[in-house]
């Protein structure tokens, strides 16, 4: 019952009030801005980001282990795809959302930094899945959730971001429009840290109206209103739960949602932490122990089931498995989208 993460970040916050914040911590805390700058430079930025020279410089001068490959920046972000497809004005998404209020059932997608810049296919699958279920998907007008800042003890910046997001999301909450996300660490920050950091009724309201995508779909199914049809998909899916997810909401909704696909045998890997733990596994002094943690149970389980599909909710876990086994896992929504009856 002890919130160890809070003890850590409150210690760091107090420590950094008297000491200089390391450049590595600044980089982690501002990953959204770094991704945006890299994307601005197009193909050149993408090449430089993942070059051996960049890894070498980050290893010796910043402290990110050179054996890690940085997440690739997609040529087209998820939000670019979304606005181009919906032909809406990116500079005024809230106005556009309000104009569409009477169309049909609606849901707000809180698209995290990693979906937007690194893995847009997850966001695309989510939109297509929710639309197939009869929902009009609205894109949240938001800033970074603040989780990277919280993890490094930069609480003032995280609190500022939290206030911006609550101010913008509360409008939807007042109208009963649910907020849905795909990345456990980002989405659950809205539910766990925001009410604690802000201490307002608005933050509590937003938290109560926020769901992981698997929770949302499972809730609709339990209420008998999930309007989705899945085709037969014989095979096996191995599911590994993200630590943040397991600590706050558990994996029952993920497993139940995957089992909606006929013929799909779903098994949860009995593993602890994957070893990545946010930026921990990227840090030079922690790389070896990070990989050792993965080798305890997770990596062997993945390697022993080569023909199975490995399903992971968290982006850090997916990167860890790819680095440790060469296997590229999928997000839950990608599996469900591929099983939809067209």
Image (spheres, rainbow, N blue to C red):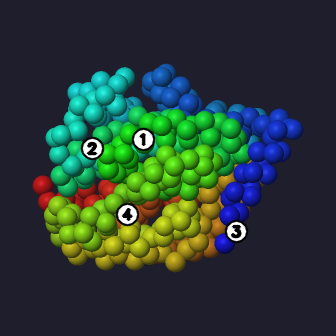
Mark 3–mark 4 Cα distance, whole angstroms, equals: 25 Å
Q: Does label 2 or label 4 sit earlier along the sequence? A: 2
Label 1: which secondary element: helix
Q: Does label 2 or label 1 sit earlier along the sequence? A: 2
Kindly report which numbered mark, 2 or 1, lies closer to the viewer in this rendering: 1
Q: Residue at x 69, y 57 (%)?
A: 6
Mark 2–mark 4 Cα distance, whole angstroms, equals: 17 Å
Q: Does label 3 or label 1 sit earlier along the sequence? A: 3
Mark 4–mark 1 Cα distance, whole angstroms, equals: 19 Å
Q: Nearer the viewer, residue 95 or 19?
A: 95
Horizontal side, residue 68 vs residue 152: left or right: left
Q: Does label 4 or label 1 sit earlier along the sequence? A: 1
Q: Residue at x 23, y 27 (%)?
A: 87
Residue 169 is marked as 1
Find residue 233 and report its horizontal and vertical position in percent.
22, 69
Task: Classify mark 3: residues with Cα within 10 Å, few (<14), some (14-19) or many (20+).
Answer: few
Please say whether residue 61 is visible from this viewpoint. yes
Find residue 215 and report its horizontal and vertical position in percent.
37, 63
Residue bearing mark 2: 137
Task: Classify mark 1: residues with Cα within 10 Å, few (<14), some (14-19) or many (20+).
Answer: many
Tell me if label 3 and label 2 are in contact, CB under 8 Å.
no
Find residue 261 and report its horizontal and vertical position in percent.
24, 70
């Amino acid at each position: 019952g002890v919130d160890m993460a809070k003890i850590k970040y409150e210690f760091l916050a107090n420590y950094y009030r008297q000491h200089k914040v390391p450049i590595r911590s600044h980089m982690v805390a501002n990953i959204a801005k770094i991704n945006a700058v890299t994307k601005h430079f197009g193909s050149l930025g993408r090449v430089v980001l993942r070059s051996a020279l960049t890894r070498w410089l980050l290893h010796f001068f910043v402290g990110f282990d050179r054996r890690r490959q940085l997440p690739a920046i997609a040529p087209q972000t998820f939000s670019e795809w979304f606005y181009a497809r919906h032909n809406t004005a990116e500079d005024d998404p809230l106005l556009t959302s309000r104009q569409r209020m009477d169309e049909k059932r609606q849901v707000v997608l809180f698209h995290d930094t990693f979906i937007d810049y690194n893995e847009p296919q997850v966001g695309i699958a989510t939109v297509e899945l929710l639309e197939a279920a009869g929902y009009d998907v609205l894109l949240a007008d938001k800033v970074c959730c603040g989780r990277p800042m919280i993890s490094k003890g930069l609480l003032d910046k995280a609190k500022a971001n939290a206030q911006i997001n609550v101010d913008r999301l509360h409008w939807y909450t007042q109208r009963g429009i649910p907020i849905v996300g795909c990345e456990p660490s980002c989405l659950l920050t809205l539910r766990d840290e925001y009410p604690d950091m802000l201490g307002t009724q608005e933050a509590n309201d937003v938290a109560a109206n926020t769901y992981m995508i698997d929770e949302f779909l499972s809730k609709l199914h339990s209420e008998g209103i999930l309007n989705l049809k899945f085709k037969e998909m014989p095979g096996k899916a191995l599911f590994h739960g993200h630590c943040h997810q397991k600590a706050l909401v558990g994996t029952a909704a993920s497993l139940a949602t995957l089992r909606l696909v006929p013929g799909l045998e779903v098994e949860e890997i009995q593993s602890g932490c994957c070893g990545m733990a946010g930026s921990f596994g990227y840090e030079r002094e922690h790389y070896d122990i990070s990989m050792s943690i993965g080798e305890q149970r997770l990596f062997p389980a993945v390697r022993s089931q080569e023909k199975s599909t490995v399903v992971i909710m968290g982006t850090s876990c997916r990167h860890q498995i790819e680095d440790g086994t060469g296997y590229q896992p999928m997000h839950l929504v990608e599996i469900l989208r591929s099983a939809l009856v067209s």
